């Protein structure tokens, strides 16, 4: 199949950037979207051009590195699918496909389709963990966890930290990412002692990093390749209110 | 003298392992290590390269202990290390099922599963620590699968008959890694760990024979810098990408390990690679990586091919009597659950007989029809739902209705830098953890034991043993302008300039693919003397062409993904030569490695304990120069070597 690509090219963080048109004549429907870019890059290199820079690593939908906006949607048109798992059979021969980086104030562009998502690590540093030094753990079965709580915790812990939620959000909010971590840890008995400090510290760091506020558009959950449910944001707001207005957080 | 004319040097001996009763060796080693005064720990600097299970766990734990840690990863966040992709689970000898499991049984299974090419002391320690790992991860909030009573669920996993594998859906590696990552981020926040993401280690700094630092490249700005420390830990994963196509992440590479090897660290058992039986078959030349379907699928899926040659009917139209369930037929007591090496080779055999399925003929069916009938679609979906979805996304076929097609692919490398019981390499002060070392899996790794080893090394072994080195040695500060530092930095700059200056006619990927083809054809599941000799010549030729004809666009002072790949592929080429030589020298079949000249009458692998009961540790002597082989004799006091039989 033949596809036309319009790709965002930007040499460095200060460059203004521009859309550039390319054509790939010999695409196959069994290719992943990243393999399509690989094929294009091989041609660009041989013709003396700069290949398109893009983040990717595991190429099996779990590491969260890949990050393109394809035809206006983070990770492209297929639901619950990362860019690396998106296959060309979802497109038609002759299609023109627009490819841009994740756009958000808190995710500055480094080059072409590569953005800096370090702000996510900062949010985790602020409290996205349970403090349990190595060696201090009690026997695993001394802490039973109701299956329903473990399952909800897992569904939230499934977040791969790709940032599609931020790229999809009209406010550039990372509330889905935040809510997912707070729900993962907050559903567990082990996560209770730090629960109220965790939510306040993580929310403050989120706001300081330049992410916007949530206005409940739900675009994040629609874009999420791991289908993190929107109700983790309710959990976030619930915990935040309890911690602050409700006075659960002891200063 | 040609590369294949290697010489045999003095034996290498593990001096750190205690002797005496195996049950107390680790306990005694822990007691004998010298301790670093807690007040001094913050003055001690440790570099940890890699942030997967081993590196992330080690950096976090060393930070908790109060050391001054500097951590590097090539990804944009430590959370993306490839441990994240491990699907199936993690073994632990908890015996929660009361099915006869014990530390000794896990030890026994792992030594046997490794086909008697691993160290007993190491494996026993691993089995002991397995129980602590589960406790630690539960305390961190890892959402393992649970029963309705709230207790942890387990399942049985390829190659064993007890249910000792803990899991979190098909995403166990992800959840364990996030546990380690969060512990690491907590230490970054506490100021004990400095994290450098998007930094790649390109050289080891050795001063007066000791590892004292690394040279790294900032992958965004291209800046080259040196970082000095009292000890260096490499937790940089495996080298499966030498085959180009593997289940590894695209960025996985051998460069950190290879640079250390070139500086004097012995590389052990490089030819011991694991070929995983349940991967999605290749679809075309554009293929950039292979995707694993967790081997837990073999608990309920049945592997078959048509009995008839050239039977290209829709698999659903082929009646049971015309199907060959070849694993069940050949290995009736283990059936579809035989270890990975056996399952992979059996699949290769039926494809060699031209009974393979799918467009390329390189595939076998993994069929869930019986499981769906027996358990119901819902139960199958609960267990494997995400794997089925992944399969459908990649192939466009629905495995609830059509049998999956699978084929073996390179998945894990048992070989790695040689380390002693303390995980110290032959360069003092250089420690190696996780898949990057060679020590615990012998010639074949059992399912669900890689996560166990990574976390065992990172959380519980290395943080203890490294203290002994730090407390026992005077380590004077190294000046930033010391000759060894300047020399290492200069070497990195010159290599980058060289790669950028060649400006030839072939892309880095084209060299990498060609290397991969050579490795898969001659150093894959089945190896012969002639084939390996041919491969060594082909790779030497490829190495020469690479350094004369590679085309790397752009400059060194920017984000340049072609340059990153070029450096890695150059090291893979040298590693590939060594792997073929190691395979050539080991004239026996064992574990995942089948040497055609060494087989039983019925075509099964024939191990040769008399001549090859050793770990092969290779010394580097120069690019393309014949290396020196140092043997570490393996002694089996507890588990007596027997020919493995899964029949």
Image: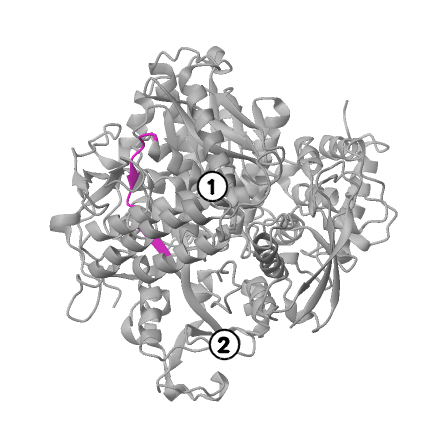
Neighbour tally class for label 1: few under 14, some 14-19, many 20 plus, Cα within 10 Å: some
User: Which range is magenta?
Assistant: B263-274
- Residue beneath the point at 59% across and 49% down: A63
Q: Which residue is mark 1?
A: B567
Q: Quadrant of the N terminus of chain A?
A: bottom right
Q: Position of residue B404 (x, y in %)?
A: 50, 73
Pick the residue in front: A196 or B430. Answer: B430
| Figure check: A79 above or below A182 | below
The image quadrant that residue A116 belongs to is top right
Which chain letter matches label 1?
Answer: B
- Residue beneath the point at 83% across and 31% down: A244
Which chain letter matches label 2?
Answer: B
B97 horizontally vs B42: left or right: left
Q: Position of residue A66 (x, y in %)?
A: 64, 51
- Residue beneath the point at 52% across and 37% down: B51
SS label for mark 1:
helix
Q: Position of residue B164 (x, y in %)?
A: 41, 52
Q: Position of residue B230 (x, y in %)?
A: 43, 19
User: First in sequence: mark 2 or mark 1?
Assistant: 2
Magenta stretch, main secondary structure class: loop
Q: Is residue B183 visible?
A: yes
Mark in front: 2 vs 1 = 1
Q: Which residue is mark 2?
A: B403
The image quadrant that residue A31 belongs to is bottom right
The reply to the same-chain question for discs 2 and 1 is: yes
Q: Is residue B453 visible?
A: no
Is residue B273 highlighted in magenta?
yes
């Amino acid at each position: 199949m033949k596809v036309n690509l319009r790709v965002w090219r930007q040499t460095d963080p200060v460059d203004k950037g521009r859309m550039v048109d390319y054509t790939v004549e010999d695409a196959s429907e069994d290719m992943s979207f990243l393999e399509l870019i690989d094929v294009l890059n091989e041609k660009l290199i041989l013709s003396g051009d700069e290949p398109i820079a893009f983040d990717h690593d595991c190429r099996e939908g779990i590491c969260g590195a890949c990050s393109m906006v394809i035809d206006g949607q983070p990770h492209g048109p297929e639901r619950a699918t990362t860019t690396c798992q998106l296959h060309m059979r979802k497109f038609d021969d002759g299609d023109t496909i627009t490819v841009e980086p994740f756009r958000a104030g808190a995710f500055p562009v480094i080059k072409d389709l590569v953005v800096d998502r370090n702000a996510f690590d900062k949010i985790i540093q602020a409290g996205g963990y349970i403090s349990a030094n190595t060696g201090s753990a009690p026997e695993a079965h001394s802490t039973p966890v109701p299956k329903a709580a473990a399952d909800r915790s897992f569904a939230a812990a499934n977040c791969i930290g790709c940032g599609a939620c931020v790229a999809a959000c009209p406010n550039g909010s990372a509330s889905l990412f935040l809510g997912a971590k707070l729900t993962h840890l907050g559903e567990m008995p082990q996560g209770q002692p730090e629960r109220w400090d965790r939510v306040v510290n993580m929310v403050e760091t989120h706001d300081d990093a330049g992410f916007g506020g949530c206005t409940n558009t739900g675009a994040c959950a629609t874009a999420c390749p791991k289908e993190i449910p929107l109700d983790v944001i309710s959990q976030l707001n619930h915990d935040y209110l309890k911690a602050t207005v409700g006075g659960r957080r002891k200063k | 003298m040609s590369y294949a004319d290697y010489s045999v040097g003095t034996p290498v001996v593990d001096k750190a392992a205690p002797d005496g009763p195996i049950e107390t060796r680790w306990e005694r080693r822990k007691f004998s290590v010298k301790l670093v005064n807690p007040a001094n720990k913050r003055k001690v600097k440790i570099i940890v390269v890699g942030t997967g299970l081993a590196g992330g766990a080690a950096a976090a734990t060393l930070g908790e202990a109060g050391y001054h840690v500097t951590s590097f990863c090539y990804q944009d966040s430590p959370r993306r290390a490839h441990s994240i992709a491990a699907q199936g689970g993690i073994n632990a000898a908890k015996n929660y099922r009361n099915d006869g499991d014990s530390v000794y049984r896990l030890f026994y299974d792992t030594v046997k599963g490794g086909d008697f090419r691993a160290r007993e002391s190491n494996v026993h320690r691993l089995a002991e620590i397995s129980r602590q790992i589960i406790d630690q991860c539960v305390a961190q909030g890892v959402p393992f699968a649970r029963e309705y009573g709230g207790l942890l669920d387990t399942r049985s996993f390829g190659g064993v008959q007890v249910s000792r594998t803990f899991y979190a859906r098909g995403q166990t590696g992800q959840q364990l890694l996030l546990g380690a990552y969060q512990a690491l981020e907590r230490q970054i926040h506490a100021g004990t760990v400095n994290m450098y993401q998007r930094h790649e280690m390109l050289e080891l700094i050795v001063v007066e024979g000791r590892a004292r630092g690394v040279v790294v490249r900032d992958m965004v700005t291209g800046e080259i810098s040196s970082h000095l420390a009292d000890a260096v830990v490499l937790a940089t994963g495996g080298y499966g990408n030498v085959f180009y196509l593997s289940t590894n992440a695209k960025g996985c590479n051998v460069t950190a390990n290879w640079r250390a090897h070139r500086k004097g660290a012995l590389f052990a058992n490089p030819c011991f690679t694991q070929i995983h039986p349940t991967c999605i078959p290749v679809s075309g030349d554009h293929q950039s990586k292979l995707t694993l379907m967790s081997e837990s699928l073999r608990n309920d899926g049945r592997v078959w091919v048509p009995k008839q040659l050239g039977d290209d009917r829709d698999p659903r139209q082929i009646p049971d009597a015309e199907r060959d369930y070849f694993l069940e037929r050949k290995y009736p007591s283990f059936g579809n659950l035989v270890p990975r090496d056996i399952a992979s080779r059996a699949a290769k055999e039926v494809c060699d007989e031209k009974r393979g399925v799918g467009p390329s003929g390189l595939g076998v069916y993994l069929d869930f029809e019986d499981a769906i009938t027996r358990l119901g679609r819902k139960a199958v979906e609960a267990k494997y739902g995400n794997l089925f979805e992944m399969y459908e996304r990649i192939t466009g076929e629905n495995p609830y209705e059509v049998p999956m097609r699978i084929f073996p692919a390179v998945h894990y490398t048992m070989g790695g830098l040689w380390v002693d019981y303390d995980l110290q390499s032959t360069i003092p002060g250089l420690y190696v953890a996780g898949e990057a070392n060679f020590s615990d899996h012998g010639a074949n790794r059992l399912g669900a034991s890689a996560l166990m080893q990574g976390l065992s090394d990172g959380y519980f072994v290395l943080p203890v043993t490294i203290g002994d080195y730090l407390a026992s040695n005077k380590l004077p500060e190294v000046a930033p302008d010391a000759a060894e530092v300047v020399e290492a930095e200069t070497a990195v700059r010159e290599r980058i300039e060289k790669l950028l200056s060649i400006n030839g006619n072939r892309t880095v990927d084209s060299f990498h693919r060609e290397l991969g083809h050579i490795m898969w054809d001659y150093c894959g599941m089945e190896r012969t003397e002639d084939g390996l000799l041919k491969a060594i010549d082909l790779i030497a030729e490829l190495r020469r062409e690479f350094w004369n004809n590679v085309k790397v666009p752009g400059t060194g002072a920017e984000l340049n993904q072609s340059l990153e790949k070029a450096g890695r592929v150059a090291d893979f080429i040298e590693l590939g030569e060594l792997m073929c030589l190691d395979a050539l020298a080991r004239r026996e079949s064992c574990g995942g490695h089948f040497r055609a000249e060494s087989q039983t009458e019925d075509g099964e692998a024939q191990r040769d304990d008399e001549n090859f009961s050793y770990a092969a540790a290779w010394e580097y002597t120069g690019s393309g120069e014949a290396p020196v082989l140092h043997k570490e004799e393996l002694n089996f006091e507890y588990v007596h070597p027997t020919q493995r039989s899964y029949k």
